[in-house]
Amino acid sequence: MKIVTSGNKYIDIDAYAGIIAYADLLNLKGIQAKAVSTAKLNESITESLLNLNVYLSEYEPSDDDEFIIIDVSNKDYFDKIVDDGRIIQVIDHHTGFEEYWKNLLNEKSRIEFIGSVATIIVEDYEKENLLPSMSKEIAILLMSAILDNTLNFKAKVTNERDLVAYRKLSKIVGNIDNYEEKYFLECQKNIETNLVNSLENDTKIEKICEILPQAFSQLTLWNKKFIFENIDIIYKTLNRISKEWMLNLISLEDRKSYIIANNECVKKKLERLFNNTFTNDILQLDNVWLRKEIIKKARSENII
């Protein structure tokens, strides 16, 4: 059995859609596969998406299981069910581990810095001439993943391939008026309902490089007002997670990212990274930035 899975702490809509869709693709090809995750689902996986007639599967270990990893390539963060010795494929859009997996898996390693891993999955359906066999439900999941991971196509990481994939999925789904705004407003409602859980479920805890703090949280909202009105909850929650943290607040309505941090050392490093200045613990960026884009910039610059 091919077990398609992702990360161990939480998964977002890109990972969720990716593992469900890729397992479906394999099954369409006659290869037995299951989409499995033991991780928490974050707020990008909305109630309407959970109510679609597509689901994760229960996992019952077997000696012949082989693992396909989607949307993560740092093996320290793979789902706990993964046996490293039985990984047969890695598909990701986060950089940093390309050489390791290329040496280990050759062409079965595909790590490409584009907007969404869902885009790669759509391209795989097309290569297998199975795009016409994709269900409307899976197409909606993949559309949502591309929207979320490209910030409605406003993120710098957005690639023409993401736009092409989204258009092809839209043809499968048919007309959904203002789907982009509806999706992000539903995500915001999830966050507002339980801000503490939202922060905990989307905080990356990893020593990425010397520039960035170990705890790196991210929230994507249509409108930033709610977060600024509840800044005390941000401080209390993230201070409990780590003494050094940052939050990347993405506000789609005004197409900007706002970096929130209260540790002076963290703030000084971020000010040098972005050549900008904090005001009352908030650093306003010139555009929307994804966490993976900030990580890529921090890794590439030597400012310490």
Image (cartoon, helix red, strand yellow):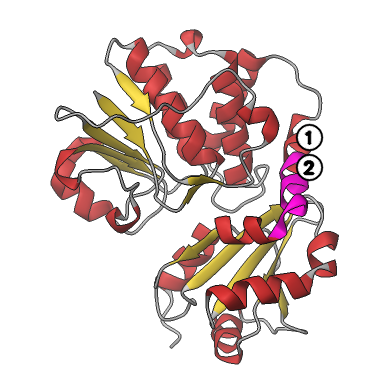
Above or below, 294 against 17 in this view is below
- Mark 2: few, some, or many residues within 10 Å (few <14, many ≥20)? some
Residue wearing tag 1: 182
Which residue does the image show at 63% across and 43% down from the upper left? 44
Q: Is residue 214 left or right of residue 220?
A: left
Q: Quadrant of residue 163?
A: top right
Q: Quadrant of residue 181?
A: top right
Residue 168 seen in this snapshot:
no
Which residue does the image show at 77% across and 84% down from the upper left? 280
Element type at marker 1? Answer: helix
Estimate the x, y position of residue 162 in percent, counting from the top left. 54, 36
Residue 189 seen in this snapshot:
yes
Magenta segment: 185-195
Above or below, 200 against 179 in this view is below
Q: Is residue 274 magenta?
A: no
- Out of 249 and 95, give the one closest to the viewer: 249
Residue wearing tag 2: 185
Please identify the dominant SS of the magenta region: helix
Estimate the x, y position of residue 108 in percent, counting from the top left. 23, 35
Q: Residue furthest front?
A: 60
Element type at marker 2? Answer: helix
The amino acid marked with disc number 2 is Leu
- Out of 127 and 233, give the one closest to the viewer: 233
Which residue does the image show at 41% across and 68% down from the upper left? 206
- Out of 237 and 273, give the one closest to the viewer: 237
